[in-house]
Amino acid sequence: FCVRYCAFVQFDSMAKRKSKVKRNPKGGVKKGDKIHGQKKGKKGEAAAYITRAQALAKLQLPLADFRKLCILKGIYPRDPKKKAQGNDKTYYHHKDIAFLRHEPLLNKFFELKTFMKKFKRLMGRREIKSARRLEERKPKYTLHHLVRERYPSFDDAIRDLDDAVSMLALFQSLSADQARDIPVDAITEATQLYQEFQLYVIRAQALRKVFASIKGYYFQAEIGGQSVTWLAPHQFAQDLPAEVDFRVMLTFLEFYRAMVKFVNFRLYSDLGLAYPPRRDVKLDSSSADVAALEVEMREAGKAQQLQSEQTEKDNADVATGVLADFGDQSEAVAMQQKLAESNRMKTTFRGLRVFVNREVPLRPLYFVLLCGGVAEVGWERGASAGESAGLGSAFPVDGEAITHQIVDRPVGSFDVRPGREYVQPQWIFDSFNIGCQLPIAPYAPGRTQPPHLSPFVDDKVEGYIPRQREVLDRFAEEVSGKIRADTAEDAKAEGGSLATGGLHQFGEELRAESEGLWHSEYQKKREDVAAAKMVTEDVGEVEMEEVKPQRPSEAEEERLRAKALMPKKHKRLLQRIENAEARKKEATTRLKKKAQANAS
């Protein structure tokens, strides 16, 4: 009986378990529990990402071709929150990989792989003629469809032009290197495209900012209402570092070359110019850079005068219309100030004839001078023995019409000719940034130049305004004849620390600064006034009041309550932001103390 009872109980439990199993109408058995039967990594965020090894297996590509394809298509690795395959893997979104599987370049990569196998086999058998015939039929591809795909509109391409122009400027300063697989045609085309872009900026007078640093020259141009910033390295012999993978950089350069061709063609079409511009073969062979575009340069110099005058009239009409429509609103005033600054930059060097000495870097100065309104520039670089001007120079060094000569030599090492000004190269950059010609004396050869301030830094936001910035801003306002009332009140509140009496006082400030005096007379007078106030005070009658702790305001209490309700992750992020602001304030305070110590 006991055995039969145990068998009955076991059979009953089996029947109950079978009763829980549901039949799937499509066939098969489906358990009632939603968790069981689900394979790990087949659903949710873990299924949305795959590793690089899985992507290579799906696309059947080697790693080098996969990297190249991702760069050309603009696909980059992702950082998922849950890494199912481990934290040491590189992940891609599965939709990106599916997007790559339909790329026409995949077939071209397969064809190139087959071609290389055949070519290497023929070269191994020393069948040179067959290898040459095969090389003539080498598969080729274009990136035009990728440019149209990644940049549906022209504004999208302009927004992404910073990296493209910086890459072109970098490679145009390098030389071809067979060991690093840097081909000659890539360097040649990068140089040509960069010079054509510079020519457009000159013709449109779109340059707005320039800064010379230890890394190179920073430029910013306004194209289509958007700012384009790029870095051009110094023209020195470059030492290629071993840790840089130039194959990756050449892949970026390959796409940027195709992109900049489209952009240059559109920009030239907007100006009504033929693309590509005509080049002078002699100047091109003598490394005259942008000046090799001889015909376009001559036309640009002649057309700049008429174009600048017409632009001034148009901007004046725009300012008048804005003033009539909006009155004295802040937006209208800001728009008028922006138009006035751009007009000043376009005509900064109008009417000058500048000659650049051999020791001065020609490329950045030539570019800035033409963007600032100079019609013709002469230079000594590339001059043969016995000649005083390089090939393509508008005039020799002994030209009578030269107004300014840029030198970077000590006094006495060059011939001083009457009727012209001799300045150091920084005078060009500082004058262009503020939109007017600065006094020559602080930039004379052999003298210590004023600090070269970056126009890309907003000193008010940083919390510290250097004295040189105050001097330059005041001089620009005096030249433009638009000194704001609030600036005059600030100068009056400071006790007359800045000059308000015109250019004579400004010249005295610059001379005192160049000699290291820092307005000692004014500082002494200020100290005397402060000492007189201290003497009149009766220290004995001053009663020290008890310092009471200040009660936080309603805004501070609300901020503390919001901070208390934050998650721990957000609190840490807020703490890092507050620490960064505190370090910034400490640095600003140190700079102010240092400036006061130097002034005293």
Image: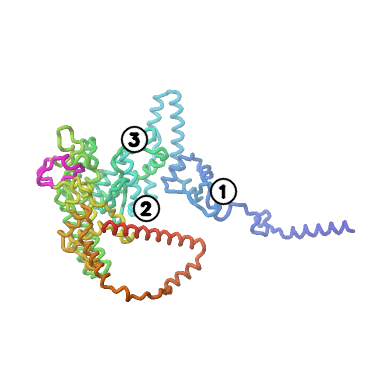
Relative depth, front residue between 136 and 197: 197
**How far separated are the C-alphas under marks 2 and 1?**
36 Å
- Main SS of the magenta segment? loop
**How far separated are the C-alphas under marks 1 and 3?**
42 Å
Please give the range of residues in magenta.
398-420
Is 414 within the magenta? yes
Relative depth, front residue between 179 and 308: 179
| Residue identified by numbered label 2 | 152
Locate the N terminus by quadrant.
bottom right
Residue lying farthest to the front in this orientation:
540
Asked if residue 45 lies left or right of residue 357, the reply is: right
Q: Residue at x 34, y 60 (%)?
A: 589
Whether residue 4 is visible to the viewer of this picture, yes or no, is yes
Quarter occupied by residue 12 = bottom right
Locate the C terminus by quadrant.
bottom left
Q: SS at mark 3?
A: loop
Q: SS at mark 1?
A: loop
- Mark earlier in primary sequence (2, 1): 1
| Residue identified by numbered label 1 | 85
Asked if residue 91 lies left or right of residue 335, the reply is: right
Q: Residues within 10 Å of mark 1 (few under 14, many from 20)?
A: some
Asked if residue 215 lies left or right of residue 504, the reply is: right
| Residue identified by numbered label 3 | 176
Q: Give, as a three-letter code, the residue at label 2.
A: Pro
